[in-house]
Image (spheres, rainbow, N blue to C red):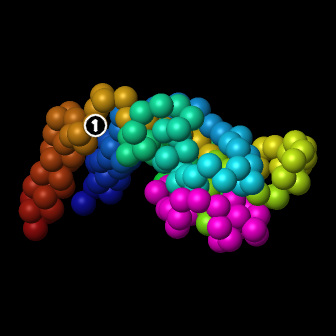
Amino acid sequence: MNIKVLKAALAGLVLSISGFANAGLIFVDSWHVGDGAKWGDQTQIAYSGQEAAAFLFGGNAEDYVISTISNVVDDINFKAWMDEYGLGMTSIPYAQDFKNGDFYISGVKSALILDNSCSDRYSNMNASCVDQYVNYAFIDDGINTVAVPEPTTAAILVLALMGLVSRTFKKR
């Protein structure tokens, strides 16, 4: 059995499939959790990561995918940093569509409204937190949204596997 042929075929398959998960997504922009209003504004609602992106960049919340890692499509983790009213920043990101309330009451989280994390409620964010707690928004560009393998890659894989099978039977 020719291991090199098998490895090459599998590598081609992995490379062709790896881009499918996030096909059609493009980076829109990013925001810091504190870019919105302060929690003291009672008319302000709490936002999920997707709702914050729609509020800031337009469109529908469902059209957005959020990440806390970077603006690279392959790094998308479908999570958003959130601030919790009365407690400050959460230590772990939440699901991009997480929502546990609308208006400011103790324990409600938002991906756009800052309580007292990284600053006090009425001053600017301190410098050590500016690059921390950034959410990255991606949107579907409408192109290549259906994951269909390229015929060339599938053909190469099939031919390689057929070659391996025939070679194995010839040796026997």
| Residue 90 shown in magenta | yes
- Residue at the (12%, 51%) spot, across then down: 162
Residue 163 seen in the current view: no
Residue 113 seen in the current view: yes
- Residue at the (82%, 58%) spot, across then down: 116
- Residue at the (62%, 49%) spot, across then down: 43
Asked if residue 95 is positioned above or below residue 125 in the image, the reply reads below
- Judging depth in this view, the residue of 10 and 81 nearest the camera is 81
Magenta-tinted stretch: 83-107
- Judging depth in this view, the residue of 108 and 145 nearest the camera is 108
x and y percentages locating residue 83 in the rendered image: 69, 59
x and y percentages locating residue 90 in the rendered image: 70, 66
Asked if residue 95 is positioned above or below residue 45 in the image, the reply reads below
What residue is disc 1 on? 145
Asked if residue 132 is positioned above or below residue 27 in the image, the reply reads below
x and y percentages locating residue 94 in the rendered image: 56, 63
User: Where the N terminus falls, by quadrant?
Assistant: bottom left
* 112 relative position to 1: left or right: right
| Residue 26 shown in magenta | no
x and y percentages locating residue 34 in the rendered image: 73, 46
* 154 relative position to 60: left or right: left
